[in-house]
Image (tube, grey):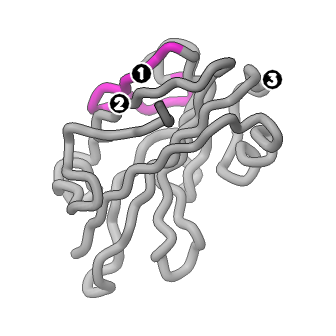
Amino acid sequence: MALAINTESFEPNGPIPERFTQVGENLSPNLYWQGEPANTQEYALIMEDPDAPNHHPFVHWVLYKIPAGVTRLPEGIPEGASPGTPPGAYHGDNTYGAKKYEGPKPPVGHGPHRYYFRLFALDTQLEVNLGLDRAALLEEMEGHVIEEAQLLGTFER
């Protein structure tokens, strides 16, 4: 079975409810996955908006060093470098420069934006701790991605 990521917070390819956006409660949605590839050592997750007018992509969430065997992230992951959920994981810097989930907040009248939750299964445990942003994480993962799964949600104001 191929790696697949999903959520109970919204319909795949559908609108992200306001409570998971900066307009609402700014909670991270629950996520779950199945089909862990053989030899997975850990996971990394990036949430990004390729439709942002000034940053391509605009990065809303970076979470890495998610232990192999973890198959679910609950709603409302706490902020901070080491959120404690799941144990051992680290938040990286999003485009805001913060180590936390920042939900969608596209410009008013800009139309619908797409938000990709990209889950990476890695064949190694990354030898890094704090401070990775999207670019640095992708560089550290190079040559170690066994499989990637994506979940898409949309939001507009």
Three-letter amino acid code of the residue under disc 3? Glu
Q: Are marks 3 and 1 in contact (CB under 8 Å)?
A: no
Residue that mark 1 sits on: 71
Q: Residue at x 60, y 46 (%)?
A: 93
Residue at the far front: name it: 1
Looking at the rendered structure, the secondary structure element under dot 2 is strand
In the shown orientation, is residue 28 left or right of residue 55?
A: left
x and y percentages locating residue 45 in the rendered image? 53, 39
Q: Secondary structure at mark 3?
A: loop
Q: Quadrant of residue 146?
A: top right
Give the quarter of the figure containing the C terminus. Answer: bottom left
**Residue 32 image label:** 2
The chief SS type of the magenta part is loop
Crowd rating for badge 3 (residues with CA inside 10 Å; few <14, some 14–19, many 20+) = few
Residue in the image at 53% along x and 57% along y: 59
Region in magenta: 69-82
Please tell me how crowded label 1 is: few (under 14), some (14-19), or many (20+) other residues with Cα within 10 Å: some
